[in-house]
Image (spheres, grey):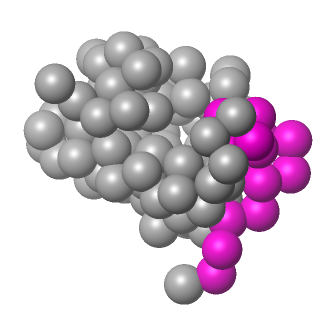
Amino acid sequence: MRPADPGSGLCAGVGALRGDVESVSRQFGRNLAEARGWEGISQKQLAERVSLNQSEVARLEYAERCPRLDKVVKLADALGVQVRDLLYGIE
């Protein structure tokens, strides 16, 4: 697995605060996959809901890419969860 490219994405900011961009990206990816599983939809279905392609959703889940905040908000809305759930875990 390639490390996430922090770019100007959310992981760069949160990771800088926490000191670990890759850890933030991995946690986000796990939380995204978990929320998608609870919703009972495929990566492709989620991608269609938020106007992304399936491969981009996969890269987010596998921590190969770090999303911008606007994408995190769209993903959370599409999955019926809070942004904090995708960042820190679903309670």
Above or below, 49 relative to 43: above
Name the one closer to the observer, 53 or 37.
37
Residue 39 position, x and y percent, is 17, 34
Query: Disc count in the image?
Result: 0
Lateral position of residue 3 relative to residue 78, left or right:
right
Residue 52 position, x and y percent, is 60, 44
Quadrant of the rendering where the N terminus is positioned = bottom right
User: What is the span of residues highlighted in magenta in the rendered image?
Assistant: 2-16
Quadrant of the rendering where the C terminus is positioned = top left
Lateral position of residue 5 relative to residue 20, left or right:
right
Name the one closer to the observer, 54 or 5.
5
For image coordinates 61% across by 68% down, the residue present is 64
For image coordinates 47% across by 67% down, the residue present is 62
Above or below, 60 relative to 11: below
Is residue 7 inside the magenta stretch?
Answer: yes
Quadrant in the picture for residue 90:
top left
**Residue 54 visible to the viewer:** no
For image coordinates 30% across by 19% down, the residue present is 81
Lateral position of residue 72 relative to residue 62, left or right:
right
Quadrant in the picture for residue 9:
top right
**Residue 6 visible to the viewer:** yes
Above or below, 91 relative to 4: above
Above or below, 72 relative to 62: above
Quadrant in the picture for residue 89:
top left
Residue at the extreme bottom of the image, as rendered: 1
Residue 87 position, x and y percent, is 45, 33
Residue 58 position, x and y percent, is 48, 63
Is residue 12 inside the magenta stretch?
Answer: yes
